[in-house]
Image (cartoon, helix red, strand yellow):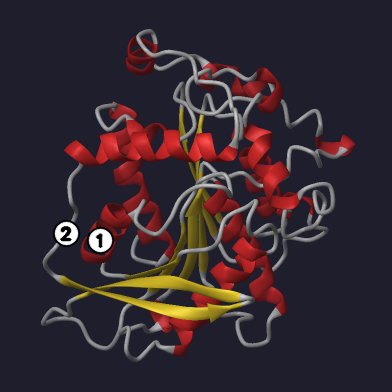
Amino acid sequence: MAQYTNISVPDPEWAAISANLPERAPFVSIPAFRERVAALRAKINLTADKGATEGLTVIERKIEVVNGEIRVRAYIPDSQENEVGGFPLMVWMFGGGFVVGDIDDDDVFLRNTAVHSRIVCVQGDYRKAPEYPFPAAVDDSYAALKWALSNSSELSIDISKGFIVAGASAGGILAAVLAHRGLKDPEIKGKITGQILLIPTLISPFAYPEKFKSELLSLDKDEDKHMLTKRDFPRGYEAYHGDLHATNLEVSPLLAESFRGLPPAYIQIAGLDLLRDEAFLYERLLRDAGVPTKLDVYPGVPHGFYVVFKELTATKKQEKDFATGLDWLLGRSS
C-alpha cells in the first residue's frame, strides 16, 4: 500500500551490508535448506553471547503428543527478596518456516528474557513438516502450553500476573493460532492475557482472499533478495499443509470471521519483509475488533534482520522494544 512506501526504503546500514551479500541461494530441497540453516546457525553461535547462566533454573522434560513425544524447556528466574509468589508465563514458539528450527535456536534470547523481564519462558520443540505436517506444529505447541499450566507450581508460574503466547515468523502464526484456540477451550478461555507476534506470517500465500488483495502487496513486491524471497517462501507452507488446508483458520488466522475477545497484541514488523502487509492488516483487524494493540515498525530492514545482523541499530532497537512491549502486555508500563 502507498502508505508503506517510506518504510520500504532500505535502511542505510542494511544497504551497506546487503551490497556485499550474495543473493539468497535458490531453494533446492528441504534437506539442503536444513543444512544451509544449520551452517548459518553454527556461524552465528561462534560469536554469539551465551545468554544468562546465573539467576535462573532451566528445566527440560519430554511430554507425550499425538503419535509421539517432544521436548519442552522452561526458563525460571530465581526469586528475589521483593518477589512474592510465582512469575508470569510466556509460551514461546520458534520460527523456521515450519520446516527448520528447534528449542535451541532461541535459548539465549529466552534465558535473557526470563532473567531481565522476570517471567517464566516455556517452549516446546514442535515437530516440523514435511515429516509432520499440519496440525502437528499447532498441536505440539498447544501441548507445551498445557504442560506449563499443569506444572505451574513446579515451574513457579502464576498466570494471574500474566499469560502470554509469543513467537517469531512461523512461530508468530503459531502464537496467533494458540490465542484463537484458547478462546474455544473451556480450560484456557479468558486466561491468555497477551500475544506477541514478531515479524509474523499470518496467512498461507495460497489463501490470499480477494477482499484483502489491495492490502496484501508486500509478497508481490519481493523487495529483499537476501533473507526471505517470494521464490522460496511458499516452500515451507507447501510442506506444512499441502493442498488441503490453506484456508483452515489454524493455518491462516487472518481469515478468521471474528477477532473479538482475543488478548492484547504486541506486533513487530520489518519494512522490507515479504510478510509486512499481512502483519499490518492483522493488527488493523484486531484493533477494529476492539483488541488493544501496540506496534513497532523497523523501516528498511528485511525479515529476520535481528537474528543475523546484531550490529544494526535497528536490531538494538528491536531488542529494547521487545522488553518494552512485554512490559506493556504485563501491565508494567503504559
Label 1 crowd bin: few (<14), some (14–19), many (20+), radius 10 Å: many
In this orientation, which residue lies closer to the viewer: 293 or 235?
235
Label 2 crowd bin: few (<14), some (14–19), many (20+), radius 10 Å: some
Q: Amino acid at mark 1?
A: Arg
In this orientation, which residue lies closer to the viewer: 251 or 157?
251
Q: Is residue 151 left or right of residue 270?
A: left
In the rendered image, the residue lying farthest to the right is: 210
In this orientation, which residue lies closer to the viewer: 33 or 315?
33
Q: Which residue is depicted at the point 35% across and 34% down?
A: 40
What label sits on residue 52 in the rendered view? 2
> In this orientation, does residue 307 appear?
no
Q: Amino acid at mark 2?
A: Ala
Q: Are marks 2 and 1 in contact (CB under 8 Å)?
A: yes
Residue 306: image x %, image y %? 36, 36
Q: Is residue 65 above or below residue 27?
A: below
Mark 1, residue position? 111
In the rendered image, which quarter is residue 280 located in? Answer: top right
Query: In which quadrant will I find the C terminus?
Result: bottom left
Q: Which residue is depicted at the point 38% across and 14% down?
A: 21
Q: Disc 2 on helix, strand or loop?
A: loop
Q: Which residue is depicted at the point 46% across and 25% down?
A: 299
Q: Is residue 278 above or below residue 118?
A: above
Residue 47: image x %, image y %? 17, 37
Of pointers 2 and 1, the one earlier in the residue sequence: 2
Q: Disc 1 on helix, strand or loop?
A: helix
